[in-house]
């Protein structure tokens, strides 16, 4: 099943995408599987496979999306931050007293680094009625913290129930009402709902040793809803994926979304090795040499994944209605790879600056930190970039601060200031980058340390 946008991809690419989801549905023994690919902010391909002959789900068919719900909840929290209603460094107690975990910050809850338990006490919350947990006391239990606060990444479903309660407290309205008003309606996600609306897939368990199925119960999660309640479609999640890259002024801007996509939790050695990190309501994984950001989700009867390669401007959504089966992230990552490799992103035409400040042009060119050579370049976006000429060394882009200095945007120099230092006659002496001195010649004797370290200067062995 295809969409009207599919002609934007080449026939061979479309067939490769269809083959990948067909293998996933067949080998994963999924009753049905639906997928979309997004490129340039638009859906360019949709596909589906099903065990029901003659009835493949389309991009309007709802599936339960599990923990992808957490990304929606995180968007609501970042909106509150951007409005000044809270700071991510605020302890929870400042806004939501009496939880027993008030020392945990908002950012730590978003990043799963607050030390909270992974699950609720008592019966498994995903498979039992939410009425068994009427409040946060039942969600958190008597021992809500299982690790020191802020010391490690430990995925916590109750932590997002707490964030949902924080949203409700500061907005004075139920989480689902705030979500619909502030995110779903502005983004046009009409088929994303708290409870299933027809047409929707039924959730199934597939027997591990026989090709037979068992229907899974559908529970309302109650207070735990902000951690995993939502139902959505391949079409709606494709639009949400585009939003997570491009932003929307009515919901959340690009800078806040970039912050959401930045790793924010301490990682364990195994996570470092696998290329996994958790951000603010989003996961980042490295696959096929690409950084992919998004979230996976599962609830009894359903599997889901939304992931995007920002560098390639390609994203994918995969939805299946089985408790276990195809690995949704692996399938989604393969869909991204197929498109990115078969039809690589065509860069925008190079454009020169409309005008250039002579004082800035005075900065560009080759510089030395000690004996290491660097190049400082000015680009059409008004930023300067510092790059090692040998291929080894620290690099960063810098934006102007308005007072003649520049501030680093990434890597080691993120937040550090680059300041041109001039001589009394106005000529450029050197660059000061967080106390590191960059000079036009290696160890320039006219510059501060490390310049002029030996009055005899350079020499040979003899």
Image (spheres, rainbow, N blue to C red):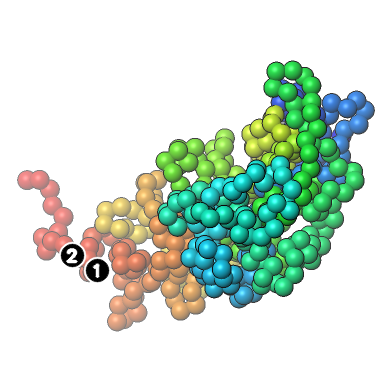
Q: Which residue: 91% across, 31% down?
A: 55
Q: Where's residue 127, x and y in %?
A: 71, 42
Image disc number at residue 452: 2
Outermost residue on the left side: it is 462
Q: Is residue 310 left or right of residue 386?
A: right
- Distance from disc 1 to disc 2, alpha carbons, whole Å, reads 7 Å
Q: Is residue 455 above or below residue 143?
A: below
Numbered-mark total: 2
Q: Is residue 77 above or below residue 224?
A: below
Residue neighbourhood size for the residue with mark 1, other residues' Cα within 10 Å, grouped as few (<14), some (14–19), many (≥20): some
Q: Is residue 286 above or below residue 458?
A: above
Q: Looking at the rendering, which quadrant does residue 126 occupy?
A: top right
Outermost residue on the right side: it is 54
Sequence-wise first label, 1 or 2: 1
Q: Is residue 145 left or right of residue 462?
A: right
Secondary element type, mark 1: loop
Q: Where's residue 74, x and y in %?
A: 64, 59
Q: Is residue 66 visible?
A: yes
Secondary element type, mark 2: loop
Q: Where's residue 73, x and y in %?
A: 67, 58
Check the picture and name the quadrant holding the N terminus.
top right
Given residues 94 and 78, the one toward you in this image is 94
Given residues 352 and 80, the one toward you in this image is 80
Q: Looking at the rendering, which quadrant does residue 33 occupy?
A: top right
Q: Is residue 46 left or right of residue 117?
A: right
Q: Looking at the rendering, which quadrant does residue 312 occupy?
A: top right
Q: Mark 1 near mark 2, Cβ–Cβ under 8 Å?
A: yes
Q: Which residue: 48% across, 41% down?
A: 271
Q: Where's residue 112, x and y in %?
A: 53, 53
Q: Which residue: 68% across, 54% down?
A: 133
Given residues 151 and 273, the one toward you in this image is 151
Residue that label 1 marks: 447
């Amino acid at each position: 099943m295809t969409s009207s946008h599919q002609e934007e991809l080449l026939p061979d690419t479309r067939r490769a995408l269809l083959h990948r989801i067909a293998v996933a549905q067949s080998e994963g023994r999924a009753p049905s599987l639906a997928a979309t690919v997004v490129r340039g902010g638009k859906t360019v391909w949709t596909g589906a496979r099903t065990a029901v002959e003659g009835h493949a789900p389309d991009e309007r068919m709802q599936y339960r999306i599990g923990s992808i719900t957490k990304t929606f909840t995180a968007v609501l929290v970042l909106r509150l931050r951007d409005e000044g209603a809270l700071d991510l460094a605020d302890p929870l107690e400042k806004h939501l007293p009496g939880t027993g975990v008030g020392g945990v910050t908002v950012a730590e809850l978003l990043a799963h680094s607050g030390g909270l338990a992974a699950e609720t006490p008592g019966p498994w919350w995903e498979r039992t009625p939410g009425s068994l947990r009427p409040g946060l006391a039942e969600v958190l239990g008597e021992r809500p913290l299982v690790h020191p606060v802020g010391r490690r990444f430990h995925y916590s479903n109750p932590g997002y129930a707490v964030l949902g309660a924080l949203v409700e407290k500061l907005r004075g309205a139920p989480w689902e009402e705030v979500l619909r008003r502030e995110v779903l309606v502005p983004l046009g996600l009409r088929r994303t709902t708290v409870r299933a609306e027809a047409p929707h897939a039924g959730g199934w368990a597939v027997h591990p040793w026989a090709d037979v199925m068992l229907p899974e119960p559908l529970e309302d999660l109650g207070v735990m809803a902000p951690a995993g309640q939502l139902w959505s479609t391949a079409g709606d999640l494709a639009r949400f994926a585009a939003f997570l890259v491009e932003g929307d002024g009515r919901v959340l801007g690009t800078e806040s979304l970039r912050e959401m996509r930045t790793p924010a939790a301490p990682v364990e050695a195994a996570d470092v090795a696998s290329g996994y990190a958790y951000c603010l309501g989003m996961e980042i994984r490295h696959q096929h040499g690409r950084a992919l950001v998004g979230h996976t989700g599962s609830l009894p009867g359903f599997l889901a994944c939304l992931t995007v390669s920002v560098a390639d401007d390609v994203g994918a959504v995969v939805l299946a209605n089985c408790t276990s089966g195809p690995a949704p992230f692996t399938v989604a990552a393969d869909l991204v790879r197929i498109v990115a490799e078969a039809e690589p992103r065509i860069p925008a035409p190079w454009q020169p600056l409309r005008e250039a400040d002579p004082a800035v042009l005075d900065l560009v060119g080759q510089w030395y930190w000690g004996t290491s050579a660097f190049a400082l370049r000015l680009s059409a976006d008004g930023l300067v970039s510092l790059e090692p000429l040998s291929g080894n060394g620290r690099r960063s882009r810098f934006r102007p601060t308005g007072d003649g200095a520049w501030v680093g945007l990434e890597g080691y120099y993120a937040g550090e200031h680059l300041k041109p230092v001039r001589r009394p006659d106005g000529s450029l002496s050197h660059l000061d980058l967080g106390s590191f001195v960059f000079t036009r010649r290696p160890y320039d004797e006219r510059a501060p340390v490390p310049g002029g370290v030996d009055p005899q200067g350079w020499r040979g062995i003899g």
